[in-house]
Amino acid sequence: MLKILKNRLLKNTMIYHIYRYLKYKKNYFPSYGATGEDVLISKIFKNKIDGFFVDVGALHPINGSLTYNLSKKGWKGLNIDLLEENLILFNLFRKKDKNINLAISRNKGIINAYIFERGSGVNTTNKKWADKWKKKIGKNYSILKIKKNSLNNVLTSHKINKEFELLNIDVEGHEIDVLKGINFKNIRPKIITIEIHVEKTEQIFKTETYRLLKKNNYELFSQYYQTSFFKSNEFNIINL
């Protein structure tokens, strides 16, 4: 009877179409990442309910986030972004986490940030990157002077354990500077996800990012569009 009523009364209504969309999205799109990277992260840590992550260049607590699925499971983490305005949403929706307004680089000091607009995914501390996007989107940027520090210093000051589950780095052309601010003898995330911007996948192996991580005993094991997945040689991925 309910099925008949649904077919007769609801099937052609907007409510029914919204219901179908939400049902489909819930069942088949368990991803908040820009290109689905968090699906692989969820599989790697599917049995881990109390992990810890560090998200450098966090931008948004839900949309495009590689850590929101983990947060929903009960994980805690450190979200770092160069714009204070972006952290307003983190303080609302990610209250279990520590949310820090800071640029991450190789050392402590002051750095120029090239800002197109609040919430933009191409805001950066890399001038060449900013100039490229300025030409591409036909929009100018403003320059802000903001505080910077190394990830090594930040994690030490927050007493983060040497070994934690996930480090995500998405800083629009400033990735190598973030990595150079890490002492990998003291900091050993099990998985590192990081954007490497190349035209062809095979070019990844020639990048400074790849060489630095390999030197520090990290292995590239997967690639999602521009996001490269590295794992510590000490970490075994089971039943992926």
Image (cartoon, rainbow, N blue to C red):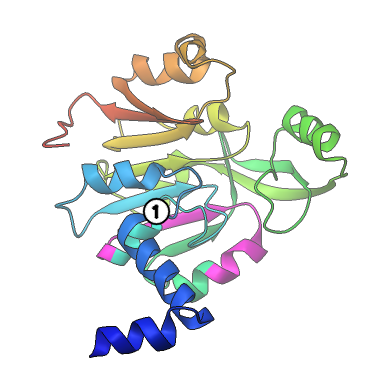
In this rendering, the answer to whether 5 lies above or below 37 is: below
Q: Is residue 182 left or right of residue 86?
A: left
> Which image quadrant for residue 76?
bottom left
- Tag count in the figure? 1
Q: Nearer the viewer, residue 182 or 140?
A: 140
Please say whether residue 88 is visible from this viewpoint: yes
Magenta segment: 73-89
Which residue is found at the position 34% from the left and 62% from the top?
A: 71
Taking the magenta stretch, the answer to whether it contains residue 77 is: yes
The residue that appears at 18% across and 31% down in the rendered structure is 235
Q: Is residue 157 above or below residue 4?
A: above
Q: Measured from the top left, where is residue 49 in percent x and y?
A: 19, 59
Q: Indicate whether residue 39 is drawn in magenta.
A: no
Residue 29 position (above or below residue 180):
below
Instruction: Please state which amino acid type lies under the numbered disc 1.
Output: Ser
Mark 1 lies on residue: 31
Give the residue drawn at x 42%, y 73%: 95
Residue farthest along the left direction in this orientation: 239
- Image quadrant containing the C terminus: top left
- x, y percent for residue 192: 36, 35
Is 96 left, or right, of 49 in this rendering?
A: right
